[in-house]
């Protein structure tokens, strides 16, 4: 029983490590085309949008503007070129202020 758990942990470690390691090994010393670099730079923002969008309209019952205001703050921060952490913290701060005054 315990050996099965150990092997399962080792297997899960390998399954998560290999896809992260392969790009470093395969692309070592190579530069990606500018188009691919541009696409990869936008992946964090696209991921953030995909995670946030479904909850925007259901964030707070009875107040649809709460979710829309938070999304607008996040979009504005992302549009200005802020990194993902600043986008998230900015929208949280904006919603905290919004909640306080309304």
Image: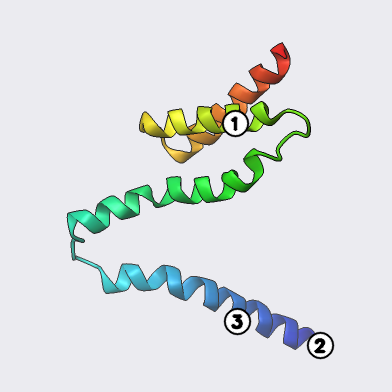
Mark 1 in CB contact with mark 3 (< 8 angstroms): no
What x and y, as percent, mark residue 94? 59, 22
Other-residue count near label 3 (Cα within 10 Å), few / some / many at <14 / 14–19 / ≥20: few
* Residue plotted at (61% across, 76% down): 12
What percent of the width, then of the height, locates residue 51? 57, 49
Compared with 39, 60 (above or below) is above
Quarter of the image with the C terminus in it: top right
CA separation, marks 3 and 2? 15 Å
Q: Please identify the quarter of the rendering in which residue 65 is found.
A: top right
Q: CA distance from mark 2 to mark 1?
A: 50 Å
Q: Which mark is first along the chain, 3 or 1?
A: 3
In the rendered image, the residue lying farthest to the right is 1
State whether residue 60 is above or below residue 102. below
Label 2 residue SS: loop
Label 2 environment density (alpha carbons within 10 Å; few <14, some 14–19, many ≥20): few
Mark nearer the N terminus (2 vs 1): 2
Q: Secondary structure at mark 3?
A: helix
Residue visible at 21% across and 61% down in the picture: 32
* Marks 1 and 3, how far apart at CA: 42 Å
Q: Is residue 79 above or below residue 32?
A: above
Comes first in the chain, label 3 or label 2? 2
Q: Position of residue 21 (x, y in %)?
A: 40, 70
Q: Which residue is mark 2?
A: 1
Which label number is shown at residue 68?
A: 1
Taking the view exactly as shown, the residue that stands out farthest to the top is: 101
State the residue in front, 24 or 73. Answer: 73
Q: Residue at x 33, y 49 (%)?
A: 41
Q: Is residue 1 left or right of residue 55?
A: right
Q: What's the mark number on residue 11?
A: 3
Please identify, in this view, whether the residue under mark 2 or under mark 1 is nearer the observer. 1
């Amino acid at each position: 029983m315990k050996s099965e758990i150990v092997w399962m942990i080792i297997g899960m470690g390998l399954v998560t490590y290999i896809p992260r390691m392969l790009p470093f090994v395969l692309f070592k010393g190579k530069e990606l085309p500018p188009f691919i670099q541009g696409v990869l730079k936008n992946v964090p923002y696209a991921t953030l949008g995909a995670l946030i969008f479904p909850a925007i309209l259901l964030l707070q019952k009875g107040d649809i503007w709460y979710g829309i205001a938070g999304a607008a703050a996040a979009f504005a921060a992302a549009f200005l070129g802020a990194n993902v952490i600043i986008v998230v913290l900015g929208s949280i701060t904006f919603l905290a202020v919004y909640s306080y005054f309304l």
